[in-house]
Every structure is written in C-alpha cells, then in structure tokens.
Image (tube, helix red, strand yellow):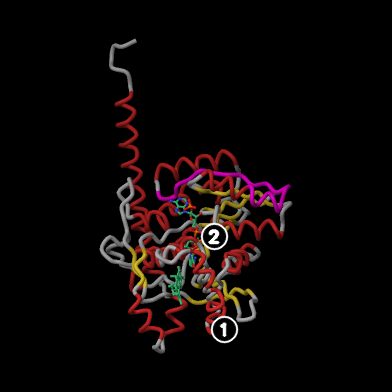
Amino acid sequence: MNKVILVTGANSGIGLALCERLLSQDMEGLQLCLACRNMHRAQAARSALLSSHPTAQVDLLQMDISSVSSVICAAHQVKLRYSRLDYLYLNAGIMPNPQFDVKAFFRGLFSSNVITMFATAEGILTQKDSITSDGLQEIFATNLFGHFLLIRELEPVLCHAGHTSQLIWTSSSNAHRSAFNLEDIQHRRGNQPYSSSKYASDLLSLALNTHYNKEGLYSSVTCPGFVMTSLTYGILPSFPAFLWILLMPLFWIIRIFTNTFTLTPHNGAEALFWLFKQKPESLNPQVKYHSLTSGLGNNYTQPCKMDIDFEMSEVFYEKLLQLESEVRKKLKAKQQKSSTSFSPPAGSS
Ligand SMILES: NC(=O)C1=CN([C@@H]2O[C@H](COP(=O)(O)OP(=O)(O)OC[C@H]3O[C@@H](n4cnc5c(N)ncnc54)[C@H](OP(=O)(O)O)[C@@H]3O)[C@@H](O)[C@H]2O)C=CC1
Ligand SMILES: CC(C)=CCC[C@@H](C)[C@H]1CC[C@H]2C3=C(CC[C@]12C)[C@@]1(C)CCC(=O)[C@@H](C)[C@@H]1CC3
C-alpha cells in the first residue's frame, strides 16, 4: 500500500524541501499531496519535484488554511480522493508585518543571552496582525486554527483501527509561554502573535495525543531552526534577498556557536523527515524535535523538553472546540443566507 502524505505550505521553503527529501528516499511507495493556496505556485512546485523524480505521484490540493470554508472544502476533497492519510504535515505558516528591534538586537549581541537570542529571537521580534474574513486573527487562523479544523475534518481518514497516522507540526523555538494567554488564545491584544500561535501548536499537539492516541493518531512538534526562506526575508523588508545570501559566510560562523542556524530549507526539514521514519508510539509527546546543523554542516535531530503542561493543554483544547462550533455555526448561517438570497422569488417559473 502506498503511504499517503499531505503537506500544507508545500510550494516553498521547508515544506517543499521536505517533499523533495521524502521523494529522494522512497519515491515508489509514496503518494504526496501538496496543499497550497496558490495553484500557480503549487504547479511550479509539482513540476520541480517531478523534474528530479519523474515517476513520483504528486497531487495538488487547493486550500487556504486561514479560511474556514476553504479548509472544509479541501478536507472534503481529501476524503473523496484517499481512503487513508498516513502523514499530515501541518507546516503552512506566516509571520506578517514583522518589526525587528535593532536596538534590542545590538544590546543582545553584547549580553550573555546572545546564543538564546540567535536561537529563539526572544526580545527582538514583534508582529502586527490582521483579521480574516471569518473574523479570526490572521496569524492564529493560519498557523494554528485552520490546521486544527483540518485535523477535525480529516478524522475519518486519520483514525483507522489497527493502523497509525502521524501529525507533524512545524512549530518554532520562538514559541514562548510568556507570549501565550489562555484568556486571549488568538492573541488579539499582544504584539507577539507569531510566538503565541507557535506555543499554541505545542499545547495542541499535547492535547491531540491525549485525545487521539487510542485511535491510532499521534502528534509531534518540530522546530526547523533559523532557515532562509521568504518568511525570514520578510523580517528585514529593506534588505533584499541577495543581501541575505551575502551574509551567509557570517551565518556559517555563527553556526559554529549555535547549531540552530540550519539556514537551508533542506537542513531545516531534517526533524520533519526524521519523524517520518520513526514509530509514532516511540515518540515523547512532551518534547519538541529540533533540526540542527553542526559547524561542519552535519544535520541531526535533537529532542528538547517543552515548557508545557497537560492541564493547560486541556483547557486550550476545550477552548478550541468551542471556537470550532462557533465558526461552524457562523458558516452555516452565512451559507443559508446566501442560498436564500439566490433562490428564485416565490411564484416565478
Ligand atoms: N524559516 C524559519 O526560520 C522558520 C520557519 N518556521 C515555520 O516553518 C513553516 C514554513 O515556513 P517557511 O518554509 O520558512 O516559509 P515559506 O514562506 O517559504 O513557506 C510558508 C508556506 O506556507 C504557505 N502559506 C502561508 N499562508 C497560507 C495560507 N493561508 N494557506 C495556505 N498556505 C499558506 C505559503 O504559501 P504561499 O507561497 O502561497 O505564501 C508557503 O508555501 C512555517 O510554519 C514557519 O512558521 C519555524 C521556525 C523557523
Ligand atoms: C543581520 C544579522 C547579522 C543577523 C540577523 C539577525 C536576525 C534577523 C535573525 C537572528 C535570529 C533569527 C531568527 C529568526 C528570524 C531572523 C533572526 C531574528 C526566527 C524568528 C525566524 C522564525 C522562527 O520561527 C524562529 C525559530 C527564528 C529564530 C531565529
């Protein structure tokens, strides 16, 4: 039987590099499904994968993970196409309107915290969030809630008796407990919505293990390290991509001191790829799997205990279920309203 793997945000960066790595190791037995919001970019990614693996099975799925209706529609497609999903990579993510605190960065450079700053960007990055058409905070909707809804919708193909499936999140070492508030799970009020959304994914992964392991579904979180992708290029908007490339020698030097500077999407995908090869029952639900690259350029995966607890993950899970039922009700009302406004007036033939 082919292994069916769905990857969100598969048309670029870490998601695309992961697909490339998966196909390089086992092209025959895999059926890849690239879930992307932009079909032109998705086609380009598919062509790139097929040019190096001409006989690979690569399907495309249109899905905007930040939109409730798009996720439900895409999940419906998945259930029609596949009887089972073996791996679901929850990788799509955004960090829009980042504000880089240059002063804090230079202060950090000359402090004892410099390595932590390079590994987690703690204290030097904030973001400005916006609201989606569903009325959700965009970063929360994209990085977390859309994926939660997708998992809920795909339950029938993820939970099969006598069979295991894996959920693998692309979280971040920028996930800080201090940025997350159970009373404001969407982070409407703070200025670190990215960090909050990633901490939320760590909590959710733990709760999913609590609720779904008995049904054969396992969840793990990864951190790809600092990778040069369009997400990171956006951090210094006045800094064109080629200048980042010119900084590479400096980054290689920094890597000698912090192996979190994985830098390339291929290296960043290390832990995501490593998890693909593990038995899910052997994984620890309370650790994050970090992609690391040594000063000599060797990749490896290291588990690191997360700053999370069961109680908090359960409260968060309940809040997500509540939000889910609210957005479903809203969507139903919207659909009913649009169907009545399009129905022909009574008496017309
Ligand atoms: N780069 C880094 O240093 C780190 C990245 N990460 C995480 O890795 C993940 C991948 O990011 P990375 O590869 O770096 O960045 P990229 O910007 O290259 O990739 C992000 C992917 O997510 C997709 N995406 C964004 N919004 C949506 C949406 N609404 N619906 C569907 N797809 C969407 C993008 O599609 P499109 O092309 O259409 O925008 C793109 O394919 C993210 O979750 C990020 O938070 C974590 C730690 C470090
Ligand atoms: C210009 C020079 C000399 C250095 C670059 C400094 C920062 C731009 C860079 C240092 C640590 C980086 C980092 C991230 C973004 C870019 C940095 C702040 C992330 C926040 C990217 C997204 C993530 O999820 C984190 C894991 C990264 C942590 C490190």
Mark 2 nearby-residue class (10 Å; few <14, some 14–19, many ≥20): many
Give residue 271's position: percent from left, percent from top.
Answer: 58, 68
| Magenta-colored stretch includes residue 50 | yes
Q: x, y (%) of residue 109? A: 41, 84
Image height of 302 relative to 134, above or below: below
Q: Is residue 262 magenta?
A: no
Q: Splitting the image into four quadrants, where does ligand 2 fall? A: bottom left
**Local SS, label 1:** helix
Quadrant including the C terminus: top left
From what the image shows, is residue 235 above or below residue 341?
Answer: below
Q: Amino acid at mark 2?
A: Gly
Mark 1 surroundings: few (<14), some (14-19) or many (≥20) residues within 10 A: some
Q: Residue at x 46, y 83 (%)?
A: 115
Number of numbered discs present? Answer: 2
Q: Which residue is mark 1?
A: 256
Note whether 237 is above or below 254 in the view shown: above
The secondary structure type at the circle numbered 2 is: helix
Horizontal side, residue 243 vs residue 283: left or right: left
Magenta stretch, residue numbers: 47-66
Residue at 44%, 81% (x, y): give it.
Answer: 116
In this rendering, the answer to whether 37 lies above or below 202 is above
